[in-house]
Image: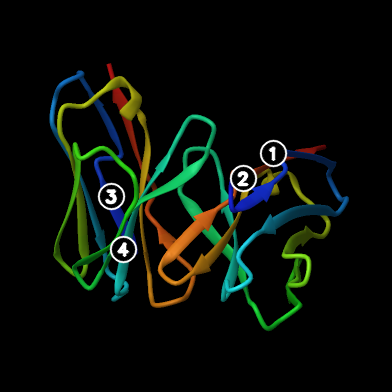
Amino acid sequence: GEDVEQSLFLSVREGDSSVINCTYTDSSSTYLYWYKQEPGAGLQLLTYIFSNMDMKQDQRLTVLLNKKDKHLSLRIADTQTGDSAIYFCAEKRSYIPTFGRGTSLIVHP
Amino acid sequence: DTAVSQTPKYLVTQMGNDKSIKCEQNLGHDTMYWYKQDSKKFLKIMFSYNNKELIINETVPNRFSPKSPDKAHLNLHINSLELGDSAVYFCASSPRGRGYTFGSGTRLTVV
């Protein structure tokens, strides 16, 4: 099975909050990341959290880390149509970065 | 100024051909990567180089050969292209332990 798991799709209404969830398996991961991929583009680093933190906030983005359950989430407040993209969770252990399959966020007007 | 640049952006070629994709980063990062993204958007690491030294070599056919002439460049050469090689290939770089910066991808189509 995969080391990093995410649900494949999330649909929200514009203005609502979006929560994208991710589970990972390696408790020794030092950094956990969220990336955004818009159609036809490369991945853009949105935010990251160090493993000794449990929360990080950056404007509309809130990252929550539950190390005990190996669960990471990304909350986007006041979701806009421009937030429609694929969001990838990733963990890094040693030199090996592992990505989830990505969650397609669809924002309806 | 593009941080991680890949060329070409699109590559259409026939089965059996040999092709190369180039990648350059101007961020001073120590580590560079090649990823393959399939049609279902799954990202799989192929190779990683740290200071010109190969450190990750996942299970990819030996038709794929990375080459790192210096710390700022990591090229990918593919021999005898097959239909299943069609995908988007991303180059990325990172400083030790931190987030990756990705190139915009090379869409390879083998016909």
Q: Judge if badges 4 and 3 mark residues of a common chain.
A: yes
Tags 2 and 1 in contact by the CB under 8 Å rule? yes
Q: CA distance from mark 4 to mark 2?
A: 22 Å
Q: Label 4 lies in what chain?
A: B
* Quarter of the image with the C terminus of chain A in it: top right
Q: Badge 3 is on which residue?
A: B6
Residue A8 is labelled as 1
Q: Nearer the viewer, mark 2 or mark 3?
A: 2
Q: Judge if badges 2 and 3 mark residues of a common chain.
A: no
Residue at the image position 47 percent from the left and 38 percent from the top: A40
Residue at the image position 38 percent from the left and 76 percent from the top: B95
Q: Judge if badges 3 and 1 mark residues of a common chain.
A: no
Secondary structure at badge 3 equals strand
Left or right, B71 with reference to B104? left
Q: Badge 2 is on which residue?
A: A102
Secondary structure at badge 2 equals loop
Residue neighbourhood size for the residue with mark 1, other residues' Cα within 10 Å, grouped as few (<14), some (14–19), many (≥20): some
Tags 4 and 1 in contact by the CB under 8 Å rule? no
Of callouts 2 and 1, which one flags the residue occurring earlier in the amino acid sequence? 1
Q: Label 1 lies in what chain?
A: A
Q: CA distance from mark 4 to mark 1?
A: 28 Å
